[in-house]
């Protein structure tokens, strides 16, 4: 396996949650539902799969409950990878 090195800036969302405004800028024109962690208890208890929240409600909930945000979120320039996807993450460092 080819070894890749990358310098990362890390943010602990438990200690430094993203605000609604930061989330709105981060998501931009991407589908906001892709940022929701489907394994989160709140996601399941609110039955978000069957009744997805509006964008504004999703932003509010993710800002209030950072574990509702799918992770990791890795950004390089204008490219972004949400969740662990080894191939897509590797494409960011090539």
Image (tube, rainbow, N blue to C red):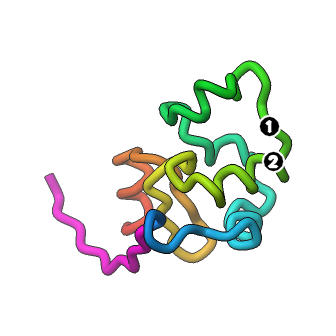
Question: Cα distance, mark 1 to mark 2?
Answer: 6 Å
As drawn, is 12 to the left or to the right of 52?
left
Instruction: Return the mark for residue 15.
Output: none
For the point 80% across and 58% down, the residue is 29
Q: Position of residue 81 (x, y in %)?
A: 51, 55
Stretch of the chain drawn in magenta: 1-12
For the point 44% across and 71% down, the residue is 15
Q: Name the residue under label 2.
A: 57
Closer-to-camera residue (28/38) = 38
Q: In this view, does 85 lie above or below 13?
A: above
**Which quadrant of the view contains residue 43?**
top right
Closer-to-camera residue (73/80) = 73
Kindly check if marks 1 and 2 are in contact, taking CB atoms under 8 A apart as contact: yes
**Which quadrant of the view contains residue 34?**
top right
- Residue 42 sits inside the magenta stretch: no
Q: Position of residue 94 (x, y in %)?
A: 38, 67
Label 2 CA crowd tier, 10 Å (few <14, some 14–19, many 20+): few
- Residue 3 sits inside the magenta stretch: yes
Q: SS for tag 1?
A: loop
Q: Where is residue 25 in the image (x, y as percent from the top left)?
A: 74, 70
As drawn, is 46 to the left or to the right of 2?
right
For the point 58% across and 52% down, the residue is 65
Q: Is residue 14 above or below residue 41?
A: below
As drawn, is 94 to the left or to the right of 41?
left
Q: Where is residue 38 in the image (x, y as percent from the top left)?
A: 55, 32
Q: Mark 1 points at which residue?
A: 53
As drawn, is 19 to the left or to the right of 69?
right
């Amino acid at each position: 396996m080819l070894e890749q090195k990358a310098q990362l800036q890390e943010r602990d969302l438990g200690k430094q949650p993203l605000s609604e405004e930061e989330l709105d800028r981060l998501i931009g024109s991407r589908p906001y539902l892709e940022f929701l962690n489907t394994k989160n208890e709140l996601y399941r208890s609110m039955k978000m799969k069957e009744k997805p929240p509006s964008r504004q409600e999703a932003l509010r909930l993710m800002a209030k409950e950072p574990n509702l945000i799918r992770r990791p979120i890795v950004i390089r320039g204008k490219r972004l990878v949400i969740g662990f996807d080894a191939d897509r993450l590797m494409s960011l460092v090539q």
